[in-house]
Image (cartoon, rainbow, N blue to C red):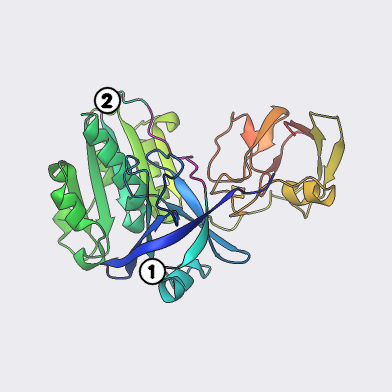
Amino acid sequence: MQQHWLKLCIVSRGVEAEGIIAIVLAAPDGGPLPHFSAGSHVDVEIAPDLVRQYSLCSTPAARDRYEIAVLRDPASRGGSTEIHERFAEGDTLRVSEPRNHFPLYPVRGEALLIAGGIGVTPLLCMAERLSAIGAPFALHYCTRSAARTAFRDRIAASGFADRVQYHFDDGPDAQRLDPASLFSGAIAEVDVYVCGPAGFIDWICAAAGSAGIAPQHLHREYFSAAPIEPAPGGDRPFLLRLASNGQMIEVAAEESAAAALARHGIEVSVSCEQGICGTCITRVIEGQPDHRDMLMIDGNAEFTPCCSRSHSPVLVIDL
Ligand code: FES
């Protein structure tokens, strides 16, 4: 399975906030792009062998463009710095078709959208969608300071500005986000959507869990994963069985399932190799996956061969 790339041009690039640029991509002929829904992301090829995922923050109704916002993060694995320093208007780059592993679910009651920094990008798209359909929601947007807060003008000009609460790290204590009190009200019908740095997501999820919000109503998207820890005592080998022809493939303790498949000439598309982008998701027909990614929860009948393993000795997969 090969990644299907779109060749897109940078039609505009602008400073969105301190350390954050917004980039608008379009087809060279200005034609329509594949549809996406709120919460979607694309893979952007920054250089050969350097691909990063960015959430789309343009409105899905604008079929001729994709907009992404990129925070310059010197502590990152290099992609954002390259984009800030090298990408210019008129450049052409390869971008995947949008994928969505962070979708909006049917509205039951109120949606609480909680953004940490640049994690606002998919949530902004969701806020616009929820506003358009008249669904109740609130957006809590936490950043280090007003100067480092992207999309303030766009939010101010939107029809939902009064549903957005900013929380600045350098502001008075009274305006800081207190997730315990946020979740202390009626939570039975609440869906929480959170995106931001891993520590921020874990903080929100812990508070939501303590407040009794069920895991299926807690939706999250990570930008990057913490290093994947081996199982206590070390990872064990396991077998993959291909459902199409019964072929058995051994995954050694020190290799990924995707690498074992590639050794046998079976290419699974991979991108982040950290369990955050979903590019490699493969259906599981039998067996119990050991999810090491940031996407799945126990019980999912899919797994991510880039980083996940198996609890059962054999995993039958839909290949
Ligand atoms: Fe990104 Fe597997 S390659 S989740």
Residue 39 in the image: x percent, y percent? 40, 42
Judging from the image, what secondary structure is the residue with disc 1 in?
Answer: loop
Q: Amino acid at mark 1?
A: Glu
193 to the left or right of 313: left
- Boundaries of the magenta span: 97-105
* Left or right side of 150 for 255: right
**Residue at the extreme front:** 29
* Residue 203 in view of the camera: no
Residue at image location 51% in from the left, 62% down from the top: 93
Residue projecting furthest to the bottom:
85
Which x, y percent locates residue 218?
Answer: 40, 35
- Pick the front one: 240 or 100: 100
Mark 2 residue crowding within 10 angstroms, few (<14) / some (14–19) / many (20+): some
User: Does 87 lie within the magenta span?
Assistant: no
Quadrant location of the C terminus in the rendered image: top right
Please determine whether, in this image, residue 315 is positioned above or below residue 55: above
Return the x and y of residue 49 as percentages of the image width and height. Answer: 63, 64
103 is within the stretch colored magenta: yes
Prevalent SS, magenta region: loop
